[in-house]
Amino acid sequence: MLMDQIQNVGHRLTSFILMPYWLILICLLSFPVQASSQEKLKIATCQFPVSGNILENSTWIKGFIREAAQNGCDLIQFPEQALSGYPPVDITSFKDYNWQLLRKETNEIMTLAKENNIWVALGSSHFINEKEKPLNCLYIISNMGEIVDRYDKSMLTDSDLKYFTPGNHIVVLELKGYKLGFLICYDSCFPEMYNIYRHENVNIMIHSFYNAHHPGRTILDDIIPSEIRVRASDNLMWVFASNSSGTYSSWPTCIARPDGSLESLEREKPGILYREFPDDKITNKFPSWTHNNKVMALPETDVYHNGIPSEDPRALDRIALP
């Protein structure tokens, strides 16, 4: 039986070899051909002096949305709390906060995103109810002008816990063949926050920060840029890290490649930084390589938040307005 099968295979192979060349060509062309180049994706990240003035913040945001769209971007990222302002630095607290104005400006930004056919990762705050603290969040606004998801900062500092409720979920967005993840500031201090995204095959991390309006130099000047490099290289991801440029700003907005190399804006100067994918940018200044092809385990018992998340419907509704 086995010899008969081998002879049959040999007969079919011989028959194929003896086919006329035109028939062989037709056979080959009948197989599906995979595209040789991936669709292009262009992302912008930016910095401006985030403040407690919603209208001023909104003016900066709208201007950068227009600029990014004019430069052919698919998505633009803004810093943590870019629209709402960050307590206690920009606002003393959320007591008597103007949520109505925040919703109005969010709606206008959503309309602008649709008009300019661009996705927006908008740092802001999300109202839950009168008794619970709001969420520190990134609204994921589509190029159709809709909030399609919301990432809520999960790892809160001791100061954050005085003003915010933690989130307890991740957000993965697929855009033009790439998987994007979303994190906020202090999340960078926890390797497991990147590891959970690596298990979701995320290629690009949109990580928004607020390390600004300090009296002067702090340890954040050194540790955060180092963490951005290490998280990128350890997880073989591109990391877009936006920061407020308000004086004193600990470090400028930057983009890290999977090899850990870093490209940055000028500290404390409003600006915008672009990167296009596939990322074929190769440095000629030094040899470059990536490492850590071994993915870390994902423990089932890990808790990916500090504090107690909310069960309120407004917290669970990830497409709601502020």
Image: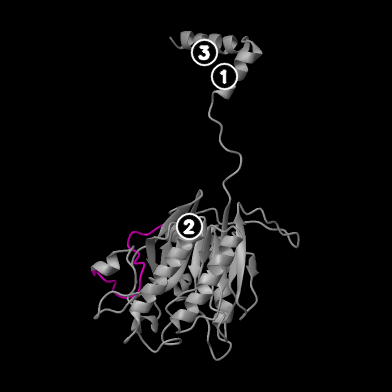
Residue at the image point whose x is 57% and y is 80% from the top: 245
| The disc label shown at residue 9, or none | 3
Mark toward the start of the polypeptide (2 vs 1): 1
Percent of width and height locating residue 219:
55, 83
What amino acid is at disc 1? Answer: Cys
Q: How is the image coloured?
A: one colour
| The disc label shown at residue 27, or none | 1
Question: CA separation, marks 2 and 1?
Answer: 39 Å
User: Could you say which is closer to the camera, residue 3 or residue 116?
Assistant: 116
Question: CA separation, marks 3 and 2?
Answer: 46 Å
Q: Is residue 61 magenta?
A: no
Residue that badge 2 annotates: 180
Residue 221 visible in the snapshot: yes
Q: Secondary structure at mark 2?
A: strand
Q: Is residue 300 left or right of residue 81?
A: left
Q: Secondary structure at mark 1?
A: helix
